[in-house]
Image (spheres, rainbow, N blue to C red):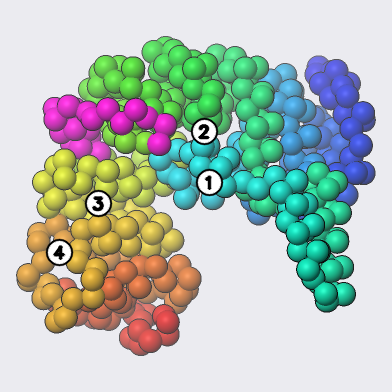
């Protein structure tokens, strides 16, 4: 039986009424943290739902968010078995959000993040400067309210507010490392995933993930740890990663190949160039993975879509492997991505491998390279061409237009010489802009 009193010791010493979350003051957070430790499943699930919605509302972190972190870490380490995985997942979201991962698939660049974040005291100084010259009473009231908010220590810049929660989770890393040895595979998986995103704790995390790779038998845990070694730029583990390219499990081979490519190219790396043989072997593993559907067991990276993740990794190998082979593998990746991720990945591929300088006349399909043709064919058969969600395909349509290609729908299938036999094809491309 878990002693909730010890687990949440100090909870009532925090002035929650002076903190805020998405719905106002944070006085309800202590009750939710207590309910998160409940033996009642419905109460526990409701508590975590409340916490995700309040202190992590659609990715935004608030002044209350970092104060909840130490208690969530204790729940993850010694809480009721049913609550531990949820606590780890909330800790991960409080640290890096899903947008951070999506926008930074190479790993979290904390140097750039810290440089861009504006602390409240800078906002106070800015307000003071504006108030010296502002004559409008309405604007002065707005500035005074903003100044009062910032002077109380509340986050104003979303990046700075998120960084507070990130650093709160970072302080818990030494105690969370032990969970890589936990008997529960789900706990080990969530822990390994959380550790992927803390390059400033690399000295402690990399050996722990490396040890996990050495002894771990669960393929998802092992693959998650392997990806972490890549994201953290663990070049000292290159030999071990190369060994994993021969693993019998395709998920392990994929993770090792992804880690090898990213370890040599990511923002946390010393950018040591992999050998030609390593590049070839890693590419072969990634291309083999791209050619088949998503395995039932996979990691949580890239919102659980390893093919979109693979496509981004393959793009790092431009000029390292034959372009047609590379584009053929990325085309396979596109076939297994959802609409949103297809839009993003395809736009990036076309920008980097097609002429997007608005050439006139447009290139004929037969004049494209074999790899470029495969990219167009993958798009022509993808659900992305039948969606009417302009926001989901805006970037792709804009990029296709810049390359002198049909934007979407009937046009792209006709361009590739394919029959117009798909239902609900978009025939009017002007609605996109």
Q: Earlier in the sequence, mark 3 or mark 2?
A: 2
Number of other residues with Cα within 10 Å of mark 1, as a class: few under 14, some 14 to 19, many 20 or more: some
Counting from the top left corner in percent of width and height, residue 248 is at 26, 24
Disc 4/disc 3 C-alpha distance (Å): 12 Å
- For the N terminus, the image quarter is top right
- Check whether the beta carbons of the residues at disc 2 and disc 4 lie within 8 A of each other: no
Q: Earlier in the sequence, mark 2 or mark 1?
A: 1
* SS class, disc 1: helix
Measure how far apart labels 3 and 2 are at the Cα level. Answer: 26 Å
User: Which label's residue is closer to the chain start, 2 or 4?
Assistant: 2
x%, y% of residue 209? 46, 19
Q: Which quadrant holds residue 260?
A: top left
The residue mark sitting in front, 2 or 4, is 2
Q: Residue at x 21, y 58 (%)?
A: 353
**Which mark lies nearer to you, 3 or 2?**
2
- The residue under label 4 is 373
Circle 3 residue = 330
- Going by the image, does 231 lie left or right of 258? right
User: Can you tell which mark lies on residue 197?
Assistant: 2
CB under 8 Å between callouts 1 and 3? no
| Mark 2–mark 1 CB contact (< 8 Å) | yes
Circles 4, 1 touching at the beta carbon (< 8 Å)? no
Quickly name the residue at label 1. Answer: 100
Q: CA distance from mark 1 to mark 3?
A: 23 Å
Point out the image quarter for the C terminus.
bottom left
Tag 3–tag 2 contact (CB < 8 Å): no
Highlighted magenta segment, given as a residue range? 267-286
Q: In the image as oriented, which residue stretches furthest toward the left?
A: 367
The total of numbered circles placed on residues is 4
């Amino acid at each position: 039986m878990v002693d909730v009193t010890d687990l949440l010791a100090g909870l009532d010493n925090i002035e929650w009424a002076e903190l805020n979350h998405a719905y106002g003051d944070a006085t309800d957070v202590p009750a939710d943290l207590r309910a998160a430790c409940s033996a009642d499943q419905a109460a526990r699930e409701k508590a975590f739902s409340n916490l995700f919605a309040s202190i992590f509302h659609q990715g935004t972190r608030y002044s209350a968010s970092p104060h909840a972190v130490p208690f969530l870490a204790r729940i993850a380490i010694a809480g009721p078995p049913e609550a531990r995985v949820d606590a780890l997942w909330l800790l991960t979201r409080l640290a890096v959000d899903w947008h951070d991962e999506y926008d930074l698939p190479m790993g979290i660049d904390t140097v750039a993040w810290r440089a861009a974040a504006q602390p409240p005291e800078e906002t106070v100084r800015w307000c003071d400067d504006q108030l010296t010259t502002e004559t409008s009473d309405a604007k002065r009231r707005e500035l005074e309210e903003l100044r009062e908010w910032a002077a109380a220590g509340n986050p104003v810049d979303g990046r700075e507010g998120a960084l507070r929660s990130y650093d709160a989770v970072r302080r818990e890393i030494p105690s969370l490392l032990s969970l890589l040895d936990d008997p529960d595979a789900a706990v080990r998986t969530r822990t390994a995933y959380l550790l992927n995103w803390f390059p400033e704790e690399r000295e402690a995390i990399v050996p722990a993930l490396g040890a996990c790779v050495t002894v771990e038998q669960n393929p998802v845990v092992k693959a998650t740890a392997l990806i972490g070694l890549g994201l953290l730029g663990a070049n000292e583990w290159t030999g071990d990663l190369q060994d994993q390219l021969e693993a019998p499990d395709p998920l392990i081979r994929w993770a090792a190949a992804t880690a090898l490519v990213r370890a040599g190219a990511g923002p946390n790396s010393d950018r040591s160039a992999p050998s030609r043989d390593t590049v070839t072997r890693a590419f072969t593993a990634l291309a083999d993975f791209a050619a088949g559907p998503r395995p039932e067991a996979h990691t949580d990276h890239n919102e659980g879509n390893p093919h979109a993740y693979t496509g981004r990794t393959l793009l790092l190998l431009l000029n390292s492997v034959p372009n047609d082979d590379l584009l053929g593998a990325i085309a396979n990746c596109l076939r297994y991505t959802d609409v949103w991720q297809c839009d993003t990945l395809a736009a990036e591929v076309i920008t980097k491998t097609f002429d997007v300088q608005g050439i006139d006349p447009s290139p004929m399909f037969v004049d494209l390279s074999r790899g470029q043709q495969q990219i167009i064919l993958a798009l022509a058969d993808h659900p992305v061409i039948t969606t009417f969600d302009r926001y989901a395909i805006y970037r792709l349509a804009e990029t296709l237009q810049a390359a002198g290609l049909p934007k979407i729908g009937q046009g792209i299938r006709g361009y590739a010489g394919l029959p117009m036999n798909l239902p609900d094809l978009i025939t009017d491309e002007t609605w996109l802009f």
